[in-house]
Image: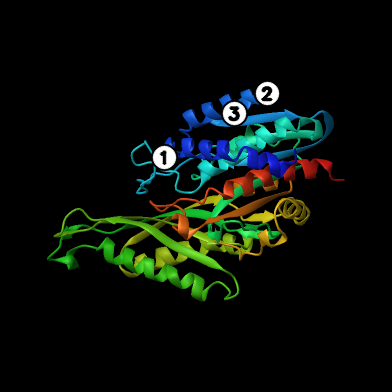
Amino acid sequence: MKVGELAKKYEGQVIAWRREFHENPELSWEEVRTGNRICEELKRMNIKVKRIAKTGVLGVLKGDKSGKTVALRADMDALPVKEANNVSYKSKNEGIMHACGHDGHIAMLLGAAKILSLMKNKVEGTVIFIFQPAEEKIQGALKMIEAGAMKGVDAILGIHLWSDLASGKVSLESGTRLAFTDMFKITIRGKGGHGSMPHQGVDAIVAASAVVMNLQSIVSREIGPLEPAVVTIGKFHGGERFNVLCDEVLMEGTTRGFNPQVRDKFPVIMERVIKETARAYRAEGELEYILGCPSVINDPQISQIASRAVINNFREESVIKLEKVMGGEDFSFYTQEAPGVIALVGVRNESKGAMYPHHHKKFNIDEDALTIGTTLYSQFALDFLDSD
């Protein structure tokens, strides 16, 4: 049987796996049950299994013929989100939810492992199955690499189910696709006092509010207008009581963009704005800038192989062009080790209730898309190993 036929044959199993993992989500570095179940399934397929990077899983399938090595990657962790979907496979773990599609990623890669194990005589080389923990913390990829997951790998494919793309469509463009994702923490220190006599202290909340507003001018006034960039404050905490002058504010946020030179500028500019703004309000400002992951850049040759894998199993119009997005992925660390591509597989289908964005409490997917991802993983592995 061909890849597409096998993917259709095992579609029900892949959906069942997805629902099982959705029902039993685990946070970053806590993917114990998830990893155990993956190991159980891979062993049933006679695929060599190894636990690495604490909760990660590495599967190895050697084909009947020797050749190159290709890696297929799926992330496993869920999010601290309380699910609001009314479905039979709703999360059993209170306050934890697969709200980003990683349950589908695991299921699709298991489906591909099943197909490739049955087509072992056509595997001209070695397939590495990377089940990665802690993508949401931007930590898992580096740990998997440090543990040897990419040793000897000639190319890698990752898939991310994508809620902004209609089900049945796949984005595989070459070039920059996802943004760098850095994090920062800001501390503003003032002087406490009575809320009725603010002149006797230094109000950290007022100073911090000014910092928030002034940081917005970085993108509009210090970065070129043709360079996409984002500065977002996602957390603002300060004050203990309504009539007590706040003496310290803690803020956290993220910067995004695509250009490495813009990334280098961010901490320098931000530190200046934070310190000088705080000083204007008689306060002190401090910045801690934490590097996350670089931009995801799809390799042109690998992108072509992946695109043909979709077109040859579905329709040419299934592969579409999608504007690059400010979301980030630590898949970018793998592509620093070997040429690769991340595919965005559409899961949006409003008629099935799949229209909420990633990380939303009602996020869900059109499960028909799982067959597309399973097929892509499998066909890409075979085609790459068969290529010159």
- In this picture, residue 90 sits left or right of residue 149: left
Viewer-proximal residue among 56 and 253: 56
Badges 3 and 2: C-beta atoms under 8 Å apart?
Answer: no
Of labels 1 and 3, earlier in sequence is 3
Q: Which mark is residue 52?
A: 3
Where on the picture, by quarter, is residue 169? Answer: bottom right
Q: Where is residue 160 in the image (x, y as percent from the top left)?
A: 58, 50
Residue 197 seen in the figure: yes
Rendered view: 381 above or below 302: above
99 or 202: nearer the viewer: 99
Between marks 3 and 2, how big is the CA–CA gap? 19 Å
Name the image colouring. rainbow
Task: Please tell me whether residue 26 is drawn above or below residue 174 in the rendered image.
Answer: above
Measured along the vertical axis of the image, is residue 270 above or below residue 119? below
Q: What residue type is labelled 3?
A: Ile
Q: In which quarter of the image is the N terminus?
A: top right
Query: In the structure shown, which secondary structural element does the residue marked by tag 1 occupy?
Result: loop
| Residue 45, quarter of the rendered image | top right
Q: Mark 2 points at which residue?
A: 46
Screen quadrant of the C terminus: top right
Q: Which residue in the structure is indicated by mark 1?
A: 89
Q: How crowded is mark 3: few (under 14 residues within 10 Å), some or many (20 or more)?
A: some
User: Which of the two labelled residues, at mark 3 and mark 2, occupies the earlier sequence position?
Assistant: 2
Determine whether the residue tagged by mark 2 lies in a helix, strand or loop. loop
In this view, the residue in front, 224 or 264, is 224
